[in-house]
Image: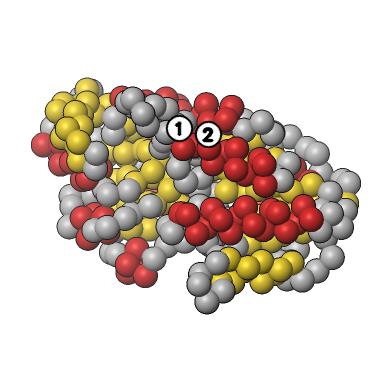
Amino acid sequence: MAGKNGAIKLVAGNSNPALADAIAAHLNTPMTKAVVRRFADMEIFVEIQENVRGADVFVVQSTSFPANDHLMELLIIIDALRRSSARRITAVLPYFGYARQDRKPGPRTPISAKLVANLITRAGADRVMTLDLHAGQIQGFFDIPTDNLYASPVMVRDIRERFDLSKLMVVSPDVGGVVRARGLAKRINAPLAIIDKRRERAGESEVMNVIGDVTGHTCILVDDIIDSGGTLVNAAEALIEQGAGDVYAYITHGVLSGGAVARITGSKLKELVITDSIQPTEAVRAAHNIRVLEIATLIGEAIGRTAHEESVSSLFD
């Protein structure tokens, strides 16, 4: 595939090769041959094994676990491409790690999302493409053009195929996610409820109240990230206690660290639906109530439009 101003090249690190291959298949463009490996002391070595001079290069790399390794792979790949005279380098981050550290929650704490944005920019990226940022204002942390894609079209299509929309209620698991939940509720013309919770300490949450009448509804919890799973498990229990029927969750990024998978499989959640922005582990694939949606078509379409200098935002109109 060729873009408006030159050949398209796709390069991937080791974070999610299956997604990168699926994007390449959608674009009918082979992956550019590259080596991303470790020295004996675990330093990262990168070699681009094809000519990329003058090319429009897209680097597909989620900064998921191990986040620091995958971030360094991304930075070194970008540096290698810049020194190989690529015309334009776009960092495609299906999952942007460190996004939860987007402000100072207390004195003497970092804003790590801004630091990572600076690192990507200084490494030589010309633009960034990512999916469902934890906070929209992170786009402003980059001093280069940034496209924040949304998984909602993929989720809405799946919801329409699987549910009776007249019985659905969309639920935000916290007050901070209301805008995201309202957007999905509007797309499927469903009512909205909110979980009011109080977080006593990091990684733990206590559900306090359900705002809205969920009696008899099939509830769909909507969020951008699921990490430990505690919030969703507590939210599902609270909804069922308030008279809801089955409870489902549609979450973009399945971080699922620690014992999260076991927590989800043992919970009252009927099903957790995540995307493959982060490569699913064997435990995730084996879980009976976790399902993965593919987003290669969405990201591939956005890459194609970017290469041809066409509108990306119209994908979500």
Residue furthest toward the left? 241
Secondary structure under the numbered disc 2 in the rendered image: helix
Q: Is residue 157 left or right of residue 197?
A: right
Is residue 297 left or right of 214 when viewed as pictured?
Answer: right
Across and down, in percent, residue 217 comes to: 24, 35
The residue under the point 84% across, 54% down is 85
Query: Disc 2 residue type?
Result: Lys
Badge 1: few (under 14), some or many (20 or more) residues near its Cα, within 10 Å? some
The residue at which mark 1 appears reads as 111
The residue nearer to you, when weighing 259 against 79, is 79
Q: Quadrant of residue 170?
A: top left
User: To which residue does mark 2 refer?
Assistant: 114
Q: Is residue 35 above or below residue 109?
A: below
For the question of whether residue 275 can be seen, the reply is yes
Q: CA distance from mark 2 to mark 1?
A: 6 Å
Residue projecting furthest to the bottom: 40
Image location (x, y in percent) of residue 307: 78, 46
